[in-house]
Amino acid sequence: MASMHLSQIRRWLLQSPPVEWGITQLRELIIGATRQGPIPQHVAFVMDGNRRFARSHGIETVEGHNLGFEALARVLEVCYKSGVKVVTVYAFSIENFKRSKYEVDALMDMAKVKLSQLAQHGDLLDRYGACIRVLGQRELVKEDVLEAIDRAVNMTAKNKDAILNICCPYTSRDEITTAIRDTVIDYSKPLPSQQRSFSESHITHAIRTQHLSAGILKVRSDSPSSGATSDTEESISTSTTLHPDSPPEDSIPEGEDDVPDLKDFRDTFPDPETITPETLNDHMFTAGLPPLDLLVRTSGVERLSDFMLWQCHQDTEIVFLKCLWPEFDLWTFLPVIVEWQWKRRKGLEREKGSRSGSEKLMKTV
């Protein structure tokens, strides 16, 4: 009973205008300080722990997800205010369809409402010029949810300053499979044929035609009688009989020796040897976005759970936090940003030192 009263007093103090104003000013000061250093351009979040938070506080699971959305709104404001350009969140996994129908339907209904709230004119995304992109398999989502998704995407399409990627329903394996499939389709399409005027086939064809025409004229002039048929003419006649639709070689008009060879019109396909990681990267859902700098997962679980497997590279900082997602806020995120900035500075200093050392060595040599 006493703890409940203390909690109510604490909440009342935090919501009082003077204290709320002071906290707001402190937040702005801290966010402004983080902007003085390097800022990750692409941050991803695995929003884990909503259900555990609900169970530990004795509330409905859906209410836990609602509180998780409020945490997302807080984090988005911190990210965009700090200068982050792209935020990617793992909202719903394809594997989540294995959960109870009640929870899946409740999550989808909540997604419709929350997407509309996010996209409202003058709200969070519009204030920071962020557009919504939904990454995943659209065909797995119900029609009414798809309409809400498209409406949110269209309402924020004019915003060009930042991006919010909502992965729903999504798994990284599905994304990679889709990228490989699209690459195979692209490399199965023939390239437009370009006729070469001085190709080897053209030259060979012209010489053969000229030699054959000269031989026919010589045979005809040396023939003792018009009724006699030479072996060469018989050969030509036989060739004409076998290919009645094609004119004889000696009927090609003068000046048309450069008739293109049929080989020049063979289909040519892209060389599979030219497929590189950049080729697949261009077919990913995140094509054209900055590399992933920072990935954060809450709830203490230390695994990626099939999220952004392709996008995680050697310079991606992966952080696992023990707090549950509804508890995630500026004070939890701030140490992560500061640590990322410190490691980034150290990395840049090492690169600079190695370059200067190489230059000194080259001068010595």
Image (spheres, grey):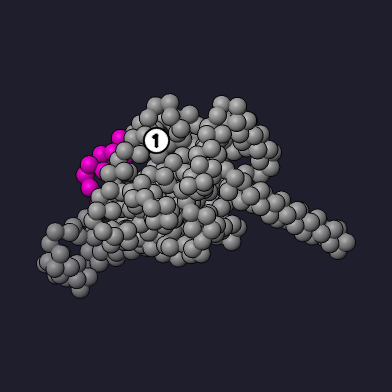
Q: How crowded is mark 1: few (under 14 residues within 10 Å), some or many (20 or more)?
A: some
Is residue 248 in view from this perspective? Answer: yes
**Residue at image coords 22%, 70%:** 232
Q: Does the magenta stretch include residue 203?
A: no
The part of the image, by quadrant, that contains residue 279 is bottom left
Give the residues in magenta.
139-151
Magenta segment, principal secondary structure?
helix
Q: Is residue 140 magenta?
A: yes
**Residue at image coords 32%, 58%:** 96
Give the percent coordinates (x, y) of residue 51: 39, 55
Give the percent coordinates (x, y) of residue 294: 56, 52
Residue 231 as seen in the image, left or right of residue 59: left
From the image, which quarter does the C terminus lie in? Answer: bottom right
**Residue at image coords 58%, 48%:** 332
Q: Is residue 122 above or below residue 146?
A: above
Give the percent coordinates (x, y) of residue 65: 38, 48
Give the percent coordinates (x, y) of residue 327: 50, 48
**Residue at image coords 84%, 62%:** 361
Q: Name the residue under label 1.
A: 118
**Front residue (pair 259, 33):** 33
The part of the image, by quadrant, that contains residue 252 is bottom left
Q: In this view, does 227 lie above or below 76?
A: below
**Front residue (pair 217, 347):** 347
**Please, what secondary structure does the residue beneath circle 1 have?**
helix
What type is the residue that disc 1 sits on? Leu
Is residue 191 in view from this perspective? Answer: no
Q: Which residue lies furthest to the right in this view?
A: 364
The part of the image, by quadrant, that contains residue 84 is top right
Q: Residue furthest bottom?
A: 231
Residue 95 as seen in the image, left or right of residue 6: left
